[in-house]
Each structure stands twice: as C-alpha cells, then as structure tokens.
Amino acid sequence: MEMPPLILVSNRGPVGFVDDGRGGTTMVRSGGGLVTALSGLVNVAPAVWISAAIEDGDARVQEESDGEYRVPGLGVDLRGRFVVMGHEVYERYYNVVANPMLWFIQHYLWDLSNVPDIGEEEYAAWDDGYIEANRLFADAVVGALADHPGSVVMLHDYHLYTAPEIIRERRPDAFLHFFVHIPWPQPDYWRVLPPRIRERIIEGLLANDIVAFHTQRYARNFLLSCEDLLGIEVDYSAMCVNYRGRRVRVRNYPISIDADGFTELAASDAVAAEEATFLRRRRRHLVVRVDRTDLSKNILRGFTAFDIFLDRHPEFHEEITFFAMLQPSRQDVPEYVEYVERITQLVSNINTKHGNTDWMPIDLRFESNLPLAVTAYKHFDVMLVNSIFDGMNLVAKEAPLVNERDGVLILSENVGAYEELGAFSLGVNPFDVDAQADALHHALTMPRDERQGRATAIKDVVMENDIAKWLATQVADIDQARGEAMLPPVTPDPD
Ligand code: GDG
C-alpha cells in the first residue's frame, strides 16, 4: 500500500528553535513520546508537521520561511509549519483549558465539591483561547492541504478537539483522522463542562472520518457520550456514528513502543554507564516506579502502600529499596507544585519511620534521565504502575520488555495497557492501598517459574503489538475508509 502524503498536527512539534544569542536560532529536537511514535510514519511518507510556536525562535523561523520550514535529519521529507499565536491566546488555550481543564476531566481528577468554577475567566479562556487557537491550527491545515493536495490529515490529542469542524467546513473533501492519547471518560463526567463547551468538543471530533483511542473502553465511552450528550444515534456493533451525512468511525489502536529500538537502548553505552553505580547500591529486592509528577500517576498512594507493606513485613526491612524516579512536570501549575511537596514530605516521613542510618527505604529522585530510568527497568523485581487513570502508560510496556530479572508488573486496572497486559500482571485498584501493599508482597514472594511465565508473556505481547503495528493498522483503516468514501452512494434496490 502506498502511503499518501501526511499532514500531522499536534501542539508540540518534532523540533523547536531557540535563539542562539547571536541573532540566529538553533534547532532542538523535542523529546516526548509523540515524536518517537510518529517517526515511523514520517520515515515512509512525505509529511508536513503543524505545531504551535512554543520556543522563542519558532515564530521567527515561521516568518522567515516560505510557509514551511525544513526539518533536516528527520523523516524522508519532513517540513514544519508553526502556528503563531499571541501569548494571551496560548496561555488561555494551553494553561487554562487544555491543561488543566480537559486533562483533569479526562483523568477524573477534579475534586468536584471544590473545583472547578466555570466563570467569566474560563469562558474567556474557551472562546478567546481554545477556540481561537484551534481556528489558527485549522487555518494552517487548510493552507497545507492547498499546498499538498490529497494529503491525509492526522490530528493528535486534546489540545485540538475543535479544529476538525473548522477544517471540515472549509474542506469537506479532506480526510481527517484524530488520535486521542488520553482516556475518554464516561459521559456524565463531561457534564462538569457547560453544554455549549462539551457539545462543541464532541461535534468537533465528529467532523473527523476516524476518531481513534487507545482502548475499547475509551472508544465505547466516546460513543456513549455522543448518545447521551448530543442525543445522536450510534452503532455499537459497527463502532461508528452517522453524523451530518458522513460516517465517523470510532476505533481503538493501543499505542506501543519501538520494541527493537528500545532493546538497543537498553544495551547502549549510555545505559551501561549508569548501571555500574546503580547495581553497586542495589539491595536484595528492588521496587521501581518511573513517572512524570502528574496527579494522574497516583504517586502518593504508591508510597502509602509501600509504608503499609513495610509495617506488615518487617522481614523485608533493610533488604529492599523502592527506587522512584520522577520527572518534574507542569511546575507552572500550582496543583503540581503542591503535589511535588506532598510527595517529598510523605517520602521523608516513611524513610524516617522505617529507615535507619544504613538503610533508606525509598530512593526518591526528581530528575529526567532516560538512561537511568532504563537501567531501573532492566533490574526491577517489581514495577509499580498504579495510575488513577492513564491513557496507555508506555512505562508498563518498556520496563518489562527489557527487564532481566523476570520482574513482576503491578498494574492499575485503569491504565490503557491493562487491556493487553492485565492477564499477566498483578492487577490493582489504584485507590486500594491495602491491595497494593498485598500485591507488593505477592510479587516479591512469587515463585520463580510463575514470574518467568508472566514476564515472558508480557514481553511477547509487547513485541507482537509494537509501534509498527499501531501505525500499520491505522494506515490500513485509513486506506479502507478513503476507498469507501470514493465509492458511489448505494442506490436502494427498487424491490
Ligand atoms: C501520555 C499519556 C500515553 C521516563 N523517564 C524519562 C523518560 N521516560 C519516558 C518513559 C516513557 C515516557 O517517558 C512516558 O510515557 P507514558 O506513556 O508512561 O506517560 P505520559 O508522559 O503521561 O504520556 C499516556 C502516552 O501519552 C502515549 O500516548 O501512554 O497514557 O498520559 O516512554 O520511558 N523520558 C525522558 N527522561 C526521563 O527521565 N526523556
């Protein structure tokens, strides 16, 4: 199958440009899973990647380009377009609506008796921030479609829900594919938002040809939301909605990792450089977690469970370390700053309560260091992934893939990865700290052959359902849907 040219759209693009202090700019590659995940596509098809101007040199690069800048060293023929918006628009779109409002709703994070208040400021952030930013993204897509006819548009994530509707109005013929990387909650939780906002979000998504999620559960929740919140008929067996004369397919494609690439990373010099020190400090048992300091990751309850485990099992004292590597995230949002403080305080209390001058039960690191994270993936006995809700959680796939000790995965039933890996992990309810404490003990005392069986099964699933499959199934579905769209409408049989 020949790949059509692509127009990729996401808030953060593959590269940014920072002022070099000498009147020029330096290109920096963006970190993050999205770029890695989509690199498989840009390596086989020409693509234009539309993203917001975020770094201080981005707007200038856009201004000085002929509409698109080249991205050397990435993809077969990758170009970029920055969407330039005023500071106030970006603030409202990104820091008021997308994060936290939509992120909190989609991870069920609001403490609803207290927050949020939807008032003048939030309406302004919606109308003059989110909608405006999405209009600017839509303009850029329409411009790119004019320059690259026949392209397939692939939009990513909760920053861009309303753009497809604007694109559709101006280009009814466009093929629009939208991937939501985070959970889609049940319809009632969307009622936190007033009707005109939540309806616009769902209508925006229904302007696509394919709306894609990680799991069946999110796809089903989306159909339920269409039914409950917009009152439109949906087809659960075909997983589609007929909306305004078009067929909208609702699909699930579990995102994954580049299994071979990640295995190579685990064997790299950069990882080996971390490994020697890491292994020297190792006690007999090692529990690991690696997360952004996001409220959805449930970091506090993980430590509380470890505290309970240490209370119940003094035989593990001095024999075990909980290595927690947390990457500071969104430290411009007050709730996230407070979260880091609460984590630090809780860890200090637990270390004081159980530890001694020779043994610190929890080794807490606030740092971003992928080689060190991968080192921990290789050597854990127990990997704790206990998110409150999590779209997929790639750590749950990466860590078992490269683990060398037949370590056990403890996995929250509310992460996307649970649909694929739940059967081979120890499933936990993320709020049940008691069960998490028991799961730690169960994992640490599991017979070797059982651990081996589970670990091998997880590796097999991750290798089978890797990122290439994630991309290939979407491309095949796009191909099929485009083919169907080109067929003449079926005329009813006169009999
Ligand atoms: C969102 C959704 C969904 C770890 N330490 C470092 C580092 N990592 C890597 C991990 C992993 C990635 O960061 C984190 O990915 P997750 O999927 O676990 O979580 P989110 O960041 O919340 O991602 C999530 C994902 O999007 C994809 O759709 O799975 O549910 O929330 O690959 O190994 N990376 C760097 N330094 C580190 O120290 N650079």
Image (tube, rainbow, N blue to C red):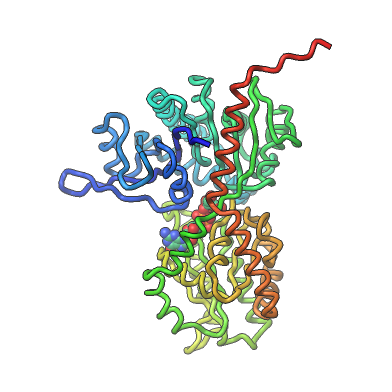
Most extreme residue toward the top is 494
Rendering quarter of residue 460: bottom right
Res 238 visible: yes
Q: Measuring 60% from the left and 49% from the top, which residue is drawn there?
A: 254
Front residue of 398/362: it is 398
Q: Measuring 45% from the left and 34% from the top, which residue is drawn there?
A: 6
Residue 318 at x, y percent in the picture: 55, 87
Q: Is residue 24 left or right of residue 30?
A: left
Q: Is residue 106 left or right of residue 239?
A: left
Front residue of 118/236: it is 236
Q: Is residue 429 left or right of residue 353?
A: right
Q: Measuring 69% from the left and 67% from the top, which residue is drawn there?
A: 426
Residue 288 at x, y percent in the picture: 54, 71
Q: Is residue 209 left or right of residue 277?
A: right
Q: Measuring 40% from the left and 68% from the top, which residue is drawn there?
A: 268
Position of residue 111 relative to residue 225, above or below, is below
Res 293 visible: no
Residue 300 at x, y percent in the picture: 57, 66
